[in-house]
Amino acid sequence: MTTNARQFELQALTDIWTGDVNGNAERLVPTGLLGSIRWWFEVLVRGLGGSPCDPSSKQKACLGKDHCVVCEFFGCTGWARKFRFDVRDAQGQLITSKLTKGKAFHLRFTQLRVVKAEEWALLELTLRLISDFGALGGKTVLK
């Protein structure tokens, strides 16, 4: 792992559904995980007194050069995220099949543009929040 990447090891306590068009969920859809992480990142920022924009709002607040802390890190219309995201196994190989109960995996965030120490800290805190109190993926109310 290079110094411009952060990796977090997790273990699935249940099968993790990341979505697919047919509903059989046999493959991993990394953007499904990333959307879940972004949602929890927004929760954390709000809990710390920040004001992230509402990406589902018809009136987009993060257009142009000014972005909320969430859009600055994860991206928004006209602004790419600051990292490449992938899911790997213990040997560093990409995982493409669904994450099943008991499976250990690594979330890797590879820096593409400058990421501030505060952004890395918020990401780490977000993943701790998810690990201790939340869930990743969709259909979490069914678990």
Image (cartoon, rainbow, N blue to C red):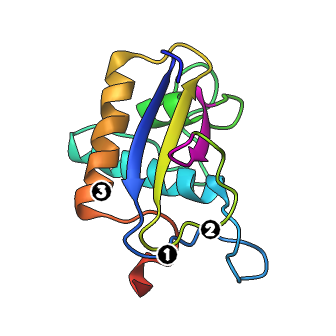
Would residue 128 appear left or right of 42 to someone viewing this image? left
The residue shown at (56%, 34%) is 62
Residue 65 placed where, x, y %? 60, 19
Q: Assign the C terminus to one quadrant of the image.
A: bottom left
Tell me the distance, in whole angstroms, between the alpha carbons under discs 2 and 1.
Answer: 8 Å
Residue 111 placed where, x, y %? 56, 22
Q: Residues within 10 Å of mark 2 (few under 14, many from 20)?
A: some
> Label 3 amino acid?
Ser
The reply to whether the magenta stretch includes residue 24 is: no
Picture layout, residue 107 above or below residue 13: above
Query: Which is nearer the N-term, disc 3 or disc 2?
Result: 2
Q: Residues within 10 Å of mark 1 (few under 14, many from 20)?
A: some
Would residue 53 appear left or right of 33 to someone viewing this image? left
Picture layout, residue 78 above or below residue 53: above
Q: Nearer the viewer, residue 94 or 135?
A: 94
Q: Nearer the viewer, residue 51 or 128?
A: 128
Would residue 96 appear left or right of 4 to someone viewing this image? right
Q: Residues within 10 Å of mark 3 (few under 14, many from 20)?
A: some
Is disc 1 placed on a helix, strand or loop?
Answer: loop
Query: Which is nearer the N-term, disc 2 or disc 1?
Result: 1
Q: Are marks 2 and 1 in contact (CB under 8 Å)?
A: yes
Q: Which residues are magenta?
A: 81-91
Residue under label 1: 15
Residue under label 2: 98
Residue under label 3: 131
> Label 1 amino acid?
Asp
Tell me the distance, in whole angstroms, between the alpha carbons under discs 3 and 2.
Answer: 18 Å
Q: Are marks 3 and 2 in contact (CB under 8 Å)?
A: no
Is label 1 or label 3 in front? 1
Q: Are marks 1 and 3 in contact (CB under 8 Å)?
A: no
Tell me the distance, in whole angstroms, between the alpha carbons under discs 1 and 3.
Answer: 15 Å
